[in-house]
């Protein structure tokens, strides 16, 4: 299927992905909101452990991006029959990778977490408790992103929205039951939150798989032929995916570093930052959807040999993403004590009060992040992922250096630590725009 560059098409592709690709953020949000009611230590631990798991999930999602880009390219070239083989190779690789990630989370996190939480033994123990139960979900998460990449690549993302809604509902109900001991379930605290999220991912994956079995539109793509592992094809996917994986690991890993540095400012500062991050994730849902959408759109346009439309696609998507984001962000960030109360609901609203300066800052930050993320994903859609990795490395290095200096060599407040995000996205936009205009990516073929 060949796509036209219209706002309607951008919205049609991006809107379902806007919620669907935010599955891990939806889980992290519901986990954080309920643990906020459990206690400040649990809430702070969720800030660290949640970021860690999202980093793990982002690695799996990023490995699938190579398959998604190739599928979108084949659809643009009207080669539907090649889609199934690309999907099989991607799925088998994701399952193998999930096994390795599960082993690390089960047996390596006790050693890994101590480097970041040495000053907070309670948060350290609670973080390990969460990951112990959360680790099982990685199998469903990684297999699920292969399905998401398939339906995103063929520009039929409606099922992704339905699956994510199911995931969110099941996760919320099980979280409430297993954290506090309702519905006849044991009260497991933060461990129950991890278990609930893993079960919810499993149920959502089964639902997605059943839909695929009855989807007649995938028959020409040879999805249900006998799966076979193609090493040559896998290498081609990895050439595209590996830089994206490194970008995701660096980007999400910088959040782990960020919270480790904020922990030096005290547990209260960590709790405030976790609240701000939770709100930031919520408001970034449009960003993830439009970013993934432009990835498919750009690759499809190149498959049609419409290279001159790539920058226009990025600009149109960025504008639409910014408009949708601001419609939600402005009221939430300007009036958090009213709009966040239904989520947080505590009589003690001091945490929201302390986070208010960061909320005001997020309003400006989202203008940078929406255009930056869309531009970066447009670049990935061209296949120039190795340049994207170099750009990401530069931006992350500047980000980490800035955070380290602010937290160790100055007495500036938390808002200055958060301003590192502006440094990161400003560099991303400036250099990424120059590269896309240079046309150096025109020779990318795969």
Image (cartoon, rainbow, N blue to C red):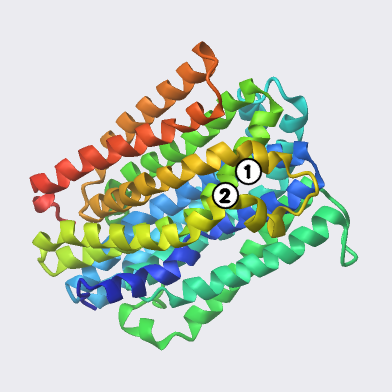
Q: Position of residue 418 (x, y in %)?
A: 49, 33
Q: Position of residue 181 (x, y in %)?
A: 88, 58
Of residues 123 and 150, the one nearer the viewer is: 123
Q: Position of residue 442 (x, y in %)?
A: 9, 52
In the rendered structure, the answer to whether residue 280 lies left or right of residue 81 reads right
Which residue is under mark 1? 275
Which residue is under mark 2? 279
| Quadrant hosting residue 167 | bottom right
Q: Are marks 1 and 2 in contact (CB under 8 Å)?
A: yes
Q: Dot 1, crowdedness within 10 Å: few (<14), some or many (≥20)?
A: many
For image coordinates 59% across by 47% down, the residue present is 278
Q: Secondary structure at mark 1?
A: helix
For image coordinates 56% across by 43% down, the residue present is 277
Q: CA distance from mark 1 to mark 2?
A: 6 Å
Above/below status of 241 relative to 153 = above
State which quarter of the image contains the N terminus: bottom left
Of all residues shown, which one is farthest toward the right? 184
> Is residue 105 shown to the viewer in this render?
no
Of residues 63 and 88, the one nearer the viewer is: 63
In the rendered structure, the answer to whether residue 151 lies left or right of residue 329 reads left
Q: Position of residue 174 (x, y in %)?
A: 75, 63
| Quadrant hosting residue 320 | bottom left
State which quarter of the image contains the C terminus: bottom left
In the rendered structure, the answer to whether residue 124 lies left or right of residue 371 reads right
């Amino acid at each position: 299927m060949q796509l036209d560059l219209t706002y309607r098409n951008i919205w049609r592709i991006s809107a379902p992905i806007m919620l669907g690709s935010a599955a891990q953020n939806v889980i992290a949000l519901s986990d954080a909101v309920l643990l906020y009611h459990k206690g400040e230590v649990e809430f702070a631990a969720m800030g660290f452990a949640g970021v860690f798991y999202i980093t793990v999930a982002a690695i799996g999602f990023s490995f699938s991006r190579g398959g998604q880009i190739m599928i979108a390219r084949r659809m643009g070239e009207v080669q539907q029959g090649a889609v199934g083989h690309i999907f099989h190779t991607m799925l088998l690789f994701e399952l193998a990778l999930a096994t390795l990630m599960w082993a690390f989370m089960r047996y390596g996190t006790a050693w890994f977490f101590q480097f970041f939480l040495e000053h907070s033994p309670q948060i350290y123990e609670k973080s390990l408790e969460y990951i112990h139960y959360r680790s099982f979900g990685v199998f469903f998460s990684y297999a699920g992103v292969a399905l998401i990449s398939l339906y995103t690549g063929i520009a039929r993302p409606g099922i992704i929205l339905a699956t994510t809604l199911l995931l969110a509902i099941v996760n919320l109900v099980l979280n409430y039951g297993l954290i506090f001991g309702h519905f006849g379930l044991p009260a497991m605290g933060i461990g129950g939150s991890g278990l609930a999220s893993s079960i919810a991912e499993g149920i959502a994956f089964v639902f997605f798989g059943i839909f695929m079995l009855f989807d007649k539109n995938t028959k020409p793509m040879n999805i249900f032929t006998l799966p076979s592992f193609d090493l040559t094809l896998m290498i081609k996917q990895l050439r595209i995916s590996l830089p994206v994986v490194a970008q995701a690991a660096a980007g999400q890993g910088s959040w782990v570093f960020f919270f480790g540095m904020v922990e030096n400012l005290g547990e209260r500062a960590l709790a405030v930052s976790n609240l701000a991050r939770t709100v930031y994730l919520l408001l970034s849902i449009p960003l993830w959807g439009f970013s993934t959408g432009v990835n498919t759109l750009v690759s499809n346009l190149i498959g049609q040999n419409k290279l001159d439309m790539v920058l226009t696609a990025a600009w149109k998507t960025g504008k639409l993403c910014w408009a949708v984001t601001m419609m939600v962000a402005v009221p939430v960030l300007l009036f958090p004590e009213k709009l966040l109360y239904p989520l947080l609901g505590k009589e003690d609203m001091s945490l929201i009060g302390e986070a208010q300066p960061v909320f005001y800052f997020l309003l400006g930050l989202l203008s940078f992040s929406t255009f930056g993320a869309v531009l970066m994903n447009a670049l990935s859609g061209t296949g120039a992922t190795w340049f994207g990795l170099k750009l990401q490395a530069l931006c992350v290095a500047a980000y980490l250096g800035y955070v380290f200096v602010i937290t160790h060599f100055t007495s500036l407040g938390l808002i200055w630590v958060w301003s590192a995000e502006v440094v990161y996205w400003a560099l991303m936009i400036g250099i990424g725009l120059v590269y896309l205009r240079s046309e150096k990516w025109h020779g990318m073929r795969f």
